[in-house]
Amino acid sequence: MNLKRHGFIAGIALTATLALAACGSDNNETSTSPTSGTSGGAAGGPTCASGSLTAQGSSAQKNAMDEWIKGYQTACKDAKIDYQPTGSGAGITAFSGGTADFAGSDSALKDGEETTKATARCGGAPALNLPMVTGPIAIAYNLDGVKDLQLKPATLAKIFGGSITKWDDAAIKADNPSATLPAAPILAVHRSDSSGTTDNFTGYLDKAAAGTWTFAKDKVWKAPGGQAEKGSDGVAGAIKKSAGAIGYVEWSFVKANSLSSAKIYNGAGEYTALTGEAAGKTIAGAKVTGTGDDLKLTIDYGTKEAGAYPIVLVTYEIVCSKGTAADKLALVKGFLGYTASTDGQKLLDKLGYAPLPESVRTKVDASIKNLA
């Protein structure tokens, strides 16, 4: 299913986050309680259930999860949900090992061992990839005197691959002919933990900088050098405090930390700033490649859409289609149903994420209703 026709809507939804960027910190004090939505219960409210859930995984979705948990627990007093931002890889491992009731991941389960272990945990039933929020990956940097850094994919690949080590390198100068670049060392910051953000970023480099990026696509960082930091908050914090630093991190963390982000050269042959509309154009080209209730999405990192910002990710919740413990099932369905509801998705605007296009949101909602 091609989402092209929803690109305009996605662009508007993303653009709305710009005016509300100040609300994107982890310490946001404003919370909207669940009131209505497709998965709502009586009187249009959420479907409340009692009990407790333990979940972990993607740090990229931490700010969204914090807000969703506050909202659900405010309305559902007998529910307790604990989400730990341990990274996508750790979350999937915990889910497959039975120590997490669901996992957050910035990339879908990989065919092979990951899928096999998750299926075994679900008693032989498929584990589902349910997209819950989309968000751009910013190339954040800390470089005094340079406000509009722009980079081609091959230049990015060389910076993060370790072959470009100074800011006044000829390749960076060629990308920025009007900028005054210092002869300062580059500190390239990457994730230390297994990360869906790393998987998406290296997937972008593998496609857009083919032949220059030689470390393939992986959740675990493979390139030499640089500085490793745990979680999205660790990467953003290191960039903020380190002059000459550059790193990849979700847009919500860039806005929460008031960082600068680079313009990226896209498949249409133009440098594009990270804006809501620009990211929405890439999101609109995503296709659902999962089957049945599995809603894995495939993103075209090499999009040739004019004005598209090409580095985006989709954050999933990984959950059993069948086989969730009987004393957990109602709460899993109630909470995830709330996150996928129209009200739950509306909360994302102020956090620097993008609500799901309605055509995808309704499919996620239907998949959650089918959990057994």
Image: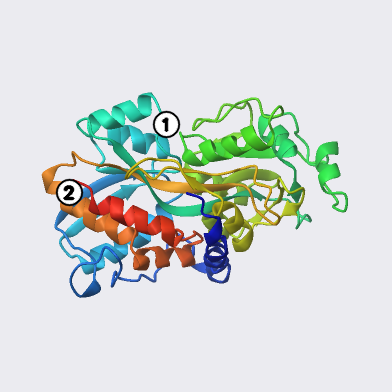
Type of colouring: rainbow
Going by the picture, which residue comes out furthest to the bottom?
43
* SS for callout 1: loop
On the question of residue 3 being in view, the answer is yes
Left or right of residue 122, residue 262 in this image: right
Residue receiving disc 2? 329
Residue receiving disc 1? 110
Left or right of residue 152, residue 205 in this image: left
Circle 1: residue type: Lys
The crowd level at tag 2 (other Cα within 10 Å; few <14, some 14-19, many 20+) is: some
The C terminus sits in image quarter: top left
Q: Position of residue 89 (x, y in %)?
A: 41, 34
In this view, the residue in front, 358 or 132, is: 358
Mark on residue 25?
none
In this view, the residue in front, 336 or 295, is: 295
The crowd level at tag 1 (other Cα within 10 Å; few <14, some 14-19, many 20+) is: few
Q: Position of residue 325 (x, y in %)?
A: 15, 42
Compared to residue 153, the image places residue 14 above or below, namely below
Going by the picture, which residue comes out furthest to the right?
177
- CB within 8 Å, label 2 to label 1: no
State the CA–CA distance, disc 2 to disc 1: 25 Å
Q: Position of residue 98 (x, y in %)?
A: 23, 34
Q: Give me the residue at 40% from left, 40% from top.
A: 290
Q: Position of residue 318 (x, y in %)?
A: 33, 42
Circle 2: residue type: Leu
Going by the picture, which residue comes out furthest to the left?
327
Q: Earlier in the sequence, mark 2 or mark 1?
A: 1
Q: Quadrant of residue 63?
A: bottom left
On the question of residue 182 being in view, the answer is no
Compared to residue 144, the image places residue 102 above or below, namely above
